[in-house]
Amino acid sequence: MSYDPRFDRYRSPNFKRTKQAGDSLRDSFAARTGWKKSAKPRDSGSFGRSPQQTAASWGRPVERLKRSKFRLWAVWAVLMLGGLGLAVNLFYLQVTRAPALRKQAEQQQTLKTKPFVPRRPIIDRAGNVLAIDRQVYTLYAHPKLFNHSKAEIAAKLAPMLAIELTPGTTSETELIRRFNLAESGITIADSLPQEVADRVAGMQIKESLVDGLELLRQQQRFYPQQELAADILGYVDGERKGQAGVEYSQQNLLERSMPSIQFSRSSNGNWVPDRLTAGFVQLDDLKLQLTIDSRLQRAARSALKEKMKQHDAKRGTVIVMDARNGELLSVVAEPSYDPNQYFNFDLSRYKNWAVTDVYEPGSTFKAINVAIALEAGAVKPNTVFNDEGRIYMNPWTIQNSDYQRAGARGPSTVTEILKHSSNVGMVHIMRTMKPSLYYQALEKLGLGQTAGTDLPFEVSSQLKNREQFINSPVEVATTAFGQGFSITPMQLVQLNGALANGGKLVTPHVVRGLFDREGEAYWKLPRAVPKQVFSPETTKQVLEMMETVVDGGTGKAAQIPGYRIAGKTGTAQKANAGGGYSKNAIITSFVGIIPVEAPRYVVLAVIDEPNEGSSGGTVAAPIVESVMEALISIEKIAPSKK
């Protein structure tokens, strides 16, 4: 077979080409022109070429054919790989990632959101508003859009706004300075009430409205009483979440439940609500009512501030509780803060240290210890002990706070020991009990636990472990006069409440429940059943002893003419963080119960680090006296019949 270059193909040597029409034309042309084919025979397939040329002409088509086959295979491989890649990617998108892509598509095409609804208001026991949502506005300026001069706008706007000024500036110059900060988006004022926003929106200069001022509406939690009940209420942050007080602990009661609304994108790209029925948004008229009395709260804060300033104290707290049911009529802590501007105060002020901090109660716990001893039958009110004024418990020395002045009092009854707040006498009283029984009684009262109040962040009281307490005589001795362990002011009120109500341990609380506009209860917070820790006979005896403290003992400053008041002073050294006690820092307190003949109200005042020479009788007792006077007026407590 030879290669025929005319047709770029191979043919057999015996191939005989049939004569065609073109050949006769070629013959006639040869006849006319005298041209004839060469008589010399040619080698088949050479066509007059040299062997070298013939070989070259044979090699080129082979190579070209090989290249054509290679290109064919390459194209086929590319197509197959591309198809395989598409198939793999299709499987990945349609099967593997299908759930994620479906979710992403839904997120892009649908939107779920809850409609904004205001938080429920908070009111006191009389219905006075303590916290409520309101509409406020933030004012922005866009100077590039002003249609009047900056000076004209500043002069018109300045009287409407309360602007913080630096020395030597006026409201107008300050506004002009802010206008020059940028061409757009300048924050001028925030938290503007509705009436101010209306005036700004309608502001005119030369009988034309002012352009370039923008009011952005938003909701804000408003506390009309400012700092009055901040220690109880807490505050709501910019994300509408409570961060302290009942705003935090009762978040689920204050937030109205509202189902989500689903929006879908329409053909023009706008969001359209799906299946929105009439009456979808329904606002209830429920309010969260507290047990707090704003009048008493105001009187307590005023009395506390006055004494803290007089004695240069670090901090203080006042608590008033109804011992019948644990309702807290007043909880005050100083220094406090304005929840409307919480961001301007130190973080330490947000906590209510009446429940978040523990301290050694000192002599205010002596009445509780006497009740423990009486309940155990270890002593009686007229049991006599020798008050030496000072005793030694190697290597410790225990003495009465007035030892340098009064010395040893000698034989003293339990009543006299409590009246004069004798440390040595209390040690003798509690030594009449087995340490194990004493420790068991302390645990029964809840030491080592919390008082269970509904105020947030309450901490547990601290008591030594059983083995350490029982095996260390000095632990029993120091506990006898209120040191060596720590409790919160709230728990001390709870324990004294048990003395006032016949021996029941009630739960202090500030929340009454949800009430409608008619004053009807929609929901009340369930309370634990009071625990009986003392007998009524024991509490009656202790109250009569505590009355002598006010009548002629260390609590004379709490006397109110015509009323029988039981009380107990306390002046305790502050424990150091590294162990031991401070030589200068003290914490003073006084707890009072009124009236003795029908005990109901417990009032506690605790003052931390007053100036030198202070005591519970001189600092805390006068505060309790002032608060009780307000309480008598508010609750209309009748004078006692002695």
Image: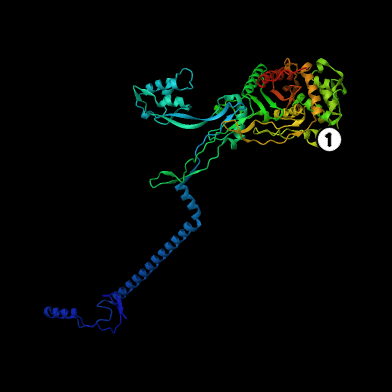
Q: Where does the image place residue 633, in percent across and percent down from the top left?
A: 66, 19
> Residue 347 falls in which quadrant of the image?
top right
Q: Is residue 118 above or below residue 165?
A: below
Give the camera-side residue of 242 and 183: 242
Residue 624 at x, y = what percent? 70, 20
Amino acid type, label 1? Ser
For residue 12, side relative to residue 419 (left or right): left
- Residue at point 79% right, 19% down? 548
Looking at the rendering, in which quadrant would you find the N terminus? bottom left
> On screen, 31 above or below 296?
below
Query: Which quarter of the rendering shows the C terminus?
Result: top right
User: Which image quarter: residue 462?
Assistant: top right
Q: Residue at x 46, y 58 (%)?
A: 89
Residue bearing mark 1: 436
Residue 259 placement (x, y as % from top left):
52, 42
Q: How is the image coloured?
A: rainbow
Q: Residue at x 49, y 22 (%)?
A: 164
Residue 201 visible: yes
Tally of numbered tags: 1
Q: Residues within 10 Å of mark 1 (few under 14, many from 20)?
A: some
